Image (tube, rainbow, N blue to C red):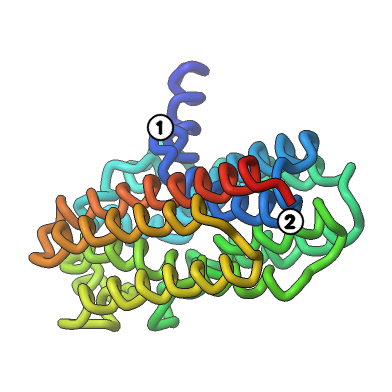
Amino acid sequence: MSMADRIQTYAQLMRLDKPIGILLLLWPMLWGLWFAAQGLPDGKVFVIFVLGAVLMRSAGCVINDFADRDFDPHVERTQHRPMAAGRVSSKEALSLAGGLSLVAFLLILPLNQLTILLSVPALLLAASYPFTKRFFAMPQAYLGVAFSFGIPMAFAAQTDSLPLIVWVLMLANLFWVIAYDTAYAMVDKPDDLKIGIKTSAITFGQFDVLGVMVCHSCFIAIMVAIGLLQSMNLLYYASLAVASALIAYQYSLIRNRDRALCFKAFLHNNWVGMVIFVGIALDFQVFPR
C-alpha cells in the first residue's frame, strides 16, 4: 500500500469523509460555550474546542471499529470499513487512536486545571463506549453521556465553574443523542439481531419509533426550560420551534422503519443542532446580557 493509499485509508477509518459525527459532537459543545460566555466565547477556547471535537470524534471512530472488528464484516452497512475489510491492523488502529487522543490532550494544556481534569473522564467514556454494545441494553444512553461531556468542559474552560445549567444542558443532549442514535440503530437492526449486539432500537422493540419521538420531545422540553433558566428571548424560542418542525419531519422518515430513510433521519439531526446553535448565538447577539 502506497503512502497516499495509507493516508486515505486512515482518513476513512477516522470517518473524515463522513463528518456527521463531528457535527453532532460539535453543536452541543458550541451551545455550552455560548451559554457559558453569555455570547461570543474566548477565541482561543473556541479554536481549541473545535479542533478537539474533530480529534476526539476521529479517535472514537477508530476505537469503535477496533472494538467491532469481528462484527462489522457481518453488517451490510459496515462490511467495507477499513478494519472490517482487513486494510488496517489492530496495532495500527490502536496507535492511531492513541496519537489522536494525545494531540487532543496537548491542545487543552493551555486551559485551566478544571478543564484538564474533566478531559480524563471524557476520554474514558469515549474509549469505553464501543464495548458497551456487548452487555448494556441502552448503549445509546452511554454514548449520550460521552457526547455531552464537551458541555461541562466548555463551561470549565470559559468560566472555571460548573453551574447547574451544565447538568440540565447535558440531560437535554442525552435525550437528543438517544433519539438520533436510535434512528441510526434502526438501520442495522436486522443485522444486529443476528450477531447479538445490543442497541436501543432492539431494546425498544416494536416501540422504537415511539421511543425516538419521546426522547426528541424530552429534549425540546428541557431546552425550553433552559431558555427560561437563562432568560432567553424570542430568537432562541424561534429556533426551538424550527427544530421541532425538523423533528416532526424526521417522524415521517422513520415511521415505516425503512432503513434508508432512518439513516436519512439520523443525518438530518445536523440541521436540528445547527438551528438551535444559530438561535442561541443570535439571541445573545441581538439581546446582549
Residue 154 to residue 195: above or below: above
Q: Which mark is residue 17?
A: 1
Horizontal arrangement in the rendering, residue 86 relative to residue 155 (left or right): left
Considering the numbered disc 1 on the image, is that residue within a helix, a strand or a loop? loop
Write down the residue under mark 2. Answer: 36
In this rendered view, identify the residue nearer to me: 55 or 224: 224
Q: Position of residue 146 (x, y in %)?
A: 58, 65
Q: Amino acid at mark 2?
A: Ala
In this rendered view, identify the residue nearer to me: 249 or 180: 249
Considering the numbered disc 2 on the image, is that residue within a helix, a strand or a loop? helix
Residue 10 to residue 165: above or below: above
Q: Amino acid at mark 1?
A: Asp
Residue at figure coordinates x 59%, y 44% from the top left: 281
Residue at figure coordinates x 29%, y 54% from the top left: 246
Answer yes or no: is residue 162 visible: yes
Eye-nearest disc, 1 or 2: 2
Answer yes or no: is residue 127 visible: no
Q: Position of residue 152 (x, y in %)?
A: 71, 63
In this rendered view, identify the residue nearer to me: 52 or 70: 52
